[in-house]
Image (cartoon, rainbow, N blue to C red):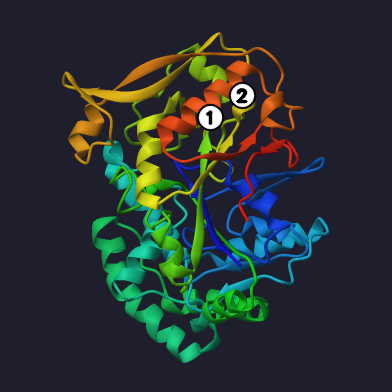
Amino acid sequence: MPALVLLGAQWGDEGKGKATDLLGGSVDYVVRFQGGNNAGHTVVVGDQTYALHLLPSGILSPGCTPVIGNGVVVDPEVLLGELSALQDRGVDTSKLLVSGNAHLITAYHTDLDKVSERFLGKRKIGTTGRGIGPAYADKINRVGIRVQDLFDESILRQKVDAALDQKNQVLAKLYNRRAIRPDAVVEQLLGYAEQLRPYVADTTLVLNEALDGGKVVLFEGGQGTLLDVDHGTYPFVTSSNPTAGGACTGTGVGPTRISRVIGILKAYTTRVGAGPFPTELFDEDGDRLRTVGGERGVTTGRDRRCGWFDAVIARYATRVNGLTDFFLTKLDVLTGWERIPVCVAYDIDGRRVTELPYSQTDFHHATPVYEMLPGWSEDISKATTFEELPKNAQAYVKALEEMSGAPVSAIGVGPGRNETIQINSFL
């Protein structure tokens, strides 16, 4: 049985939560493999809307085991708060598994994130201020705190002391902030230990044994391809790898286990935070996309920047992830435009470029080259098959599929759980 990777093929916010949730009834495990509570998924189930930030979307599917892998950074307060909120709404959260090797976000990580971003001024990255970057930095610098450390007070104290030796110097001498007391941090972290203990497991072993037993495992990425720390629009990126390779390092499951890689692709383009965005719109069309599409970040609460579909980015996502399928979301948002521009290439200082520039300078100077496709005015939210879509909507999907380099296997025609056209099975 397959192991599937599902990830964002743009700058995030493509609708991964809906796609994961739709597959959740057909899979046995849904696994978050990177990021933290800087990601957000909105999932609509019937008349209920759920905003998930750290938990895998599969937690809303009764037969599914949700897993937080070792590649995720976990804010224990946020995790416990999110679990409590779901439990209050009648959602069973008892199946959740959390890797003991996942790193923790502490109060000093969030403090450093916020103060350093303010210190950058006009050069700021546009982080969420939730401590994600500093937690990953500690992980790479080998001074991080892991979930398993909560259960050994001696080790926890040693690690917190080591981490704060340097950080207190930075806070006091660079940012003119008060030093953080290690004892206060340890006391706070130990307070989470018994609440988290029932969920903690060797998730690498669990997942590999599940695959050995013929179970279906879905790996769910946060953010999107263009926010990958290695393959995104650096430095305006996240601090982890939301591309397909991150599913292996973030879970301990080998690449030969993965059979499908599904890219979630919005029918237009959005991003949150600073950084280049060639098709960004600053006119009425941009405002309309933002309003009709409900483009406000689930986690950040910030309005998303909106623009037309960028086929150059989609082709790049296909290449770096080895995408086998696309799930095209929010096609319904484009209803009502007489003509719909699609970016097919960039103009960079008079040169036509059809692949994503590797140079940061070139990408900042890229202007979109558009091809106009005919729009449609019919309501498509009730369509259940591809043939029920208006001819121009069908042509739009086919054009995006050809430009992007992978087949479109599902189409979102509305926000609801059932407002999806399934063309090809992912399983």
Q: Earlier in the sequence, mark 2 or mark 1?
A: 1
- The quadrant the C terminus occupies is bottom right
> Tag 2: Cα neighbours inside 10 Å, few (<14), some, or many (≥20)?
many
In this rendering, would 80 be left or right of 256? right
Residue 20 x, y percent position in the rendering = 63, 52
- Using the rendered view, name the quadrant where residue 249 is placed: bottom left
- The quadrant the N terminus occupies is bottom right
The kind of residue tagged 1 is Ala
| Viewer can see residue 38 | no
| Depth check, front residue: 14 or 400 | 400
Query: What residue would you read off at disc 2?
Result: 333
The kind of residue tagged 2 is Val
| Depth check, front residue: 134 or 111 | 134
| Viewer can see residue 364 | yes
Label 2 with label 1: CB-CB less than 8 Å: yes
Disc sitting over residue 267 in the figure: 1
| Depth check, front residue: 182 or 77 | 77
Instruction: Identify the residue at horizontal 31%, vertical 25% (top origin).
Output: 345
